[in-house]
Structure formats: C-alpha cells, structure tokens
Amino acid sequence: MSRARLFVLRLVVAAMMLTLVGRLWQLQVVSGAQYAQAAAEVRIRTATLPPTRGQILDVAGRPLVTNKTRPVVTVDAVELAHQPDGGEAVLTRLGQVLRQPYRQIAEKVRLCGPRVAQPCWQGSPYEPIPVSEGVTALQISEQQQDFPGVRTELRPVRAYPFGAAAAHTLGYVQGAKGRDGLEAVYDKELAGKAGRREVAVDNTGRVTRTIRLDPPVPGDTLVTSIDSRVQTIAEQALSKALSSSGGSSGAAVVMESDTGRVVALAGRPAYDPSVWTDGVTAREYKALPLLSRAVQGEWAPGSTWKVTSVAAAASAGYGLGATYDCPSGYTVGNRLFRNFAGADLGLMTMHGALVESCDTIFYRLADELWQRESDVMQKTARGFGFGRPTGVDLPGEAAGAVPDAVSKKAYWQATRKESCRRAVKGYPEMADQGRAAYLTAIAGENCRGGGVWRGGDAANFAIGQGGVLVTPLQLARAYAAIANGGTLYSPRVGLRIVRPDGSPDGSTVRTIEPPVAGRLPASAETLRFIRQALGQVPRSGTAQGAFEKFPFDQIAVAGKTGTAESFGRRDTSWFASFAPDPAYTVVVVLSEGGRGAEGAAPAARDIWEGILGLTERRTFRPESGSSRDQRGPSERDHSTQERR
C-alpha cells in the first residue's frame, strides 16, 4: 500500500474516532441529564386505582344500587388502534371465545365522537372498556398471548338487587361516570376520588419498589326517600293494570304530600340497568326503553285537570256553591261539545261537577271566560306548576304544555307551509284512511287561517284536552299541593349524602331538602272545597266502582279520575289521589288504558291497599304533617250510567 493511501486511511479512521468521541461527549455531558431523566421516567410506571363507587339506598337503608366484584374482560382501544388491522383480528378471536360476532364487540369499544351514534364508549379512550364478565374472563386470562390489548381483571361492577324496578330513577354507569338518573345527578358524590400508585420497574418490567401510593377515596352513599317496599307495590300494580287494560305504557308516582319527597317512581316499559355492565350493541341500544314515563312521559290529563279549572272559576268570581246545569251537550260557536256518554246530569254545584266529572259545566265556563278575553285558566294552570319542569333531581325532565293564544299562533306560523302542502297532497303514506282524511282536513283549515285561539280551544283546555300535556310527576306534585294546603314543592328523590360506613344514619355530609317552588293560586277555602269534592269521588262518584268496599276508615283516599282522548288510539287512563294518613299522593297513568275508572283507578287502589298492608309504613317521616278531613259534605250527588 502506498504512503498516500495509508495517510488517507489513517485520516478516515481518525475522523471516525473524533466523530464517535464527539457524539459520546454530547450524550454523556451535554444531554446526559436529559437522557438520565428520560431513563428514570421509563422505569416508573403509574397505575390509577379506581375508587369504590358509593351505594344508593332506600329510605330504610336497603340497597337499591350496590357493588360486587367480578372478573371482567376489558379492551384497550388505544392499543388496538395501533395494531396493523386496527385490532380486527384480536376482536374476531375474542368474539369466538365470547360467542359474539365481531361487529357486536366493535360497537361496544368504539369511541364516542361528533359523528359516532350511540351506542359508543363515553369514557376516556385511555380507560379499559368492559366487554364481558364472568367465566369468559378466566378463559381469556389463560390465553393472554393471543389477545394483545385485551385484559382480564377483578373490578367492582354495579349491581341492582331489584332488577328493573326504578331503573329510570336510578340510572346507570358507563366509563366510571353516572350517565342517567340519580347516578348522573349525584355523580360527584357517588364517584369518590381515584387513587394513584407509582412503581419502579427494571428493564424486564418487574416491579422493584413502590415509589408513591395515594389510596383511592370511596364515594359517599346516597340515601333516597324511595321506599323499596312501596316501589315494589307500585311496580306490581302498574304491571297488573297494563296487562288487564291492554295499555301500552304507563307510570305510577307516590309522593309525600307534606314534604315533596318521592316515595316511588314506577314506569313501563322498563329494563334491567345491569345490561350496561358488559356494554350494549346498536341493536340492544335501540331496543332499550330509556324514557322515564313518570318524569319524561307527557299525556293529556283529561278530567284530572278540572281541579285547575275549578280554581280558575273561583278566581274569576264564579260561586263554588252556586247551581249549574249539566246538560248532555253545550254549543261553542257552531260546534256541539257533548258530555261524556251524552249524559244529562241536571243541576249541580261545582262539588257535583268534580264528583260526577261533568264536562258541559266546564265547557260553559271556558266559553264565557273566552268571550271575556280572560286568560285566568292558563294563569291558574301555570300557578299549579304545569307548563314547566318541576325541578326534580333527575335529568331530562319534560315540561308539559299549557297552550294559549300566543303558543297556538307561533305553532301555526311554524307549520303553515307544511299544512298547506299536506292540504293538497294529503297523507297517502298512512294506512288508516279515516285518520288520513281527518288530518288532511285539519291541514286545510290550518292553511287557510289557523293560529287563532277560539272558543273550542278554550273548551277543550278546560277539561284537560286540546294540546294540554302533563307528566305524571307534575300531576302528582299539583295534587300533593292541594292535599297539603297549597305548598308547591320541587320534588326530591335524594334524601341524604352520608359517609360510606354502611349505615343510612352514618355521618351525614348533607341533607337534601325539597325546595318550595311556590303557592297554588287558590284560597284556603277553595282548596278545602276541592279536597271535600275529591273525597267523594271514590265513595259515590266516578271511581266508586273501583273503590267498592275500600277501608276508607283506615285510609281516607280522595281522588279524581281522568279519561283523555287520543285520536287513532285508545283513551289514556288517569287517577290522581291523596290521603291524610299516610300523607301520600298517588298518581297512575296508563297509555291506551281506557277509562280512568276502569284502568288507573283500580291500580291506584292496589297501591293504597299495599301501603295499608305495610306493618311499618315509613322509616322517614316528615317533621310536621296534617290530617285533614277530606270527606265531602252530605251533598246529594247525581249519578251517571257510565262512570269514568
């Protein structure tokens, strides 16, 4: 080798050595601290320690929602997303073990987003997503190498001892967060605080020591005013009534009249909230009856509404003890409004109008007030709490509707274009030709000149029809206010937040009081008159048949039947009632349940008799109450051939 070539070779070697030394100096000296810190961070692993979620108890401390530990199969959505096929192969193998198709599991683990419809995972993408539990979790743990991104672990899951009972009231948990019902409203108190554990690991991943441990703080316990015994009674009575009447859905509400506390909320159809434990598929989600009929269901109240019309009449100067005619029909404008079953009941006072549920008396009152351009009926109805949410401590409450001239005109303006289109085109897509013809005629009328509040609108309003909508909870709160002398409460299901020591009488964090929302726009004399009239309804009025041989000497039940018409469907059945001891209000509604006296009233009787059969009626009693005499005067009542 020539000297020149040897020199070049040495020069190249020297340059390489200098480069290596320079790089080594940069790593060790210039960036040494940075890499040392990074290395330390790599060797520290942080694990979140989930807290135990607080229980939900009934008023006597019976668990409504509790926890139990189960082996659970979870999926790491982020880890799956980094796999070449997005985790499809892993989920397919997982589905074979779980006996579920790939699509079903994929729906459970997809992350929620603006363009992702339910069902989807609402929790953090970095949180393990549960897909199954029980024996299959053990099978997965034995084949862990075949399921990267899939884990098995023991974790607490929510348990519901009463199954579907009060499901909509209790709500459910997804992603360690309350998503509906009490679970959502009191999520902050129930959730607790997550713990944290930092551990040091060697290069093989073995834990060498614990650096820091912050234990989780368990969630507080929510004690409710729900009485699980009364809840069970209401659930059974509602199911029985829907089965016997052929109703499609319904609700039952039991409240403490003197406090505004909710004792029971039953709704049908319902579902078992434990379905959320393993996640739900799109098909399962669509099939879930998530609507709370007691709080979110809206129906025309029918004759149960007449208590507001009586109060409005008294405010307008009509004498409650005066005599009124109850003919078979009353003409408003050019339309004849008939009494129920065309009955001519003769002369009676407002007392008899409530007991016998005379429609034509209220048609006349509404027509006369409409001619005077008075809105006293709407103002009174709003004063009874209708047309706005009650403010109950449950999410998604419906407001109902109190129609008037303003709302009718606004609706007409918003829908006039569609009405004109339908007036020409009709409803060819409807199989029921009679209903299609009716709707086409209405569309033509609205196209030509709708939006005017007429006497017929006022007449329908007076008997709880014509666009009037209420929720069962709204009606229960109004009747509770009638019973307690006029105080309108914002209902509460929550009673106390207590420390998680297992006792409803443990260390109380705070007591939940139902706020007073207002006073009924009626005098004490008017409310006393209404209570006395309603006291006769189950004895000699429209609910007499349903309450035959009822022990009124033990529970002096007062109430009002309601039968609301729904075009193209069977009537909605209502019964609203209250008693002085126990001071409860009970409301039952059956959608398509027929007459109030034949569907809802017998269900309410079952609830009252169930309450009477309880040896210990309530663990939580109001501090003060009233025992009002709700039996009416010895007024001679006119009977109808058909009662509703």
Image (tube, rainbow, N blue to C red):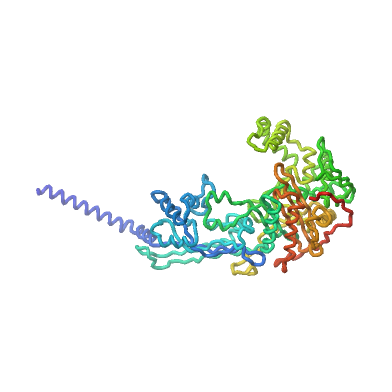
On screen, residue 263 versus residue 85, left or right, reads right
Residue name at image x 25 percent, y 56 percent: 21
Q: How many marks?
A: 0
| Figure check: 309 above or below 53 | above
Q: Can residue 199 be seen in this view?
A: yes
**Residue 579, position in %: x, y?**
78, 60
Q: Which of 57 and 533 is in front in this view?
A: 533
Residue 308 point in image, percent of width and height: 79, 49
Above-or-below relation of 521 to 220: above
Q: Is residue 605 above or below residue 457?
A: below
Q: Which residue is drawn at 35% across and 58% down?
A: 35
Left or right of residue 484, residue 268 in this image: left
Q: In which quarter of the image is residue 205?
A: bottom left
Residue nearest the viewer, comparing 282 with 294: 282
Q: Is residue 331 above or below residue 533?
A: above
Q: Where is residue 590 in the image (x, y as percent from the top left)?
A: 70, 51
Q: Is residue 413 visible?
A: no
Residue 532 lies left or right of residue 416; in this view the side is right
Give the x, y percent position of residue 229.
68, 64
